[in-house]
Amino acid sequence: MEKIVSLRYSSLVLGEYGMKLDSTQLQHLAKLSKLHLTPDEERTFLGNMDEILDFLSRLPAEEASESDISSEAGVRLFEEQVEYPEPESLFHNVKHEMVNDAISIRTSLSA
């Protein structure tokens, strides 16, 4: 069973070090998070940063610990697949051409 080690990265909680997040750092974090912030959202976020960091500092610190991934327990990767009784009925609404029991979809790249 795969293990995950969860750590609290206190160096990311900038408030503990008296640091202020500037616009360049915020844009970098937004890019890493795949967020597209408008200039108004950036100003609002930077204005509320002290409250956000205060909230993060009040969250309980989680010590380094190992925990099992239990979400994989119900997955049976090597279970034999059972044939569907009427496979043709699965495709009766398909508007594309069937080729070798597969749906053939023309794309814009097809000639």
Image (cartoon, helix red, strand yellow):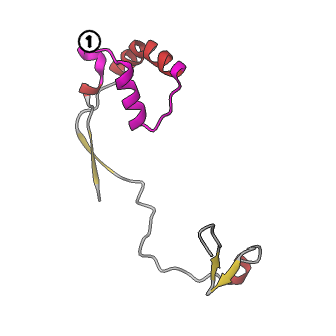
Q: What's the magenta region?
A: 13-40
Location of the N terminus by quadrant is bottom left
Horizontal and vertical percent position of residue 39: 51, 21
Horizontal and vertical percent position of residue 53: 37, 18
Q: Is residue 14 left or right of residue 85?
A: left
Q: Nearer the viewer, residue 66 or 33?
A: 33
Q: Secondary structure at mark 1?
A: loop
Residue bearing mark 1: 18
Which residue type does callout 1 highlight? Gly
- Please tell me whether residue 22 belongs to the stretch shown in magenta: yes
Residue at image location 77% in from the left, 73% down from the top:
93
Give above or below for 106 relative to 75. below
Q: Is residue 23 left or right of residue 89?
A: left
Counting every numbered tag in the picture gives 1
Q: Is residue 86 left or right of residue 40?
A: right
Give above or below for 76 relative to 64. below
- Please tell me whether residue 62 belongs to the stretch shown in magenta: no
Horizontal and vertical percent position of residue 74: 45, 62
Q: Residues within 10 Å of mark 1 (few under 14, many from 20)?
A: few
Residue at image location 41% in from the left, 18% down from the top:
52
Q: Nearer the viewer, residue 56 or 44?
A: 44
Residue at image location 48% in from the left, 16% down from the top:
43
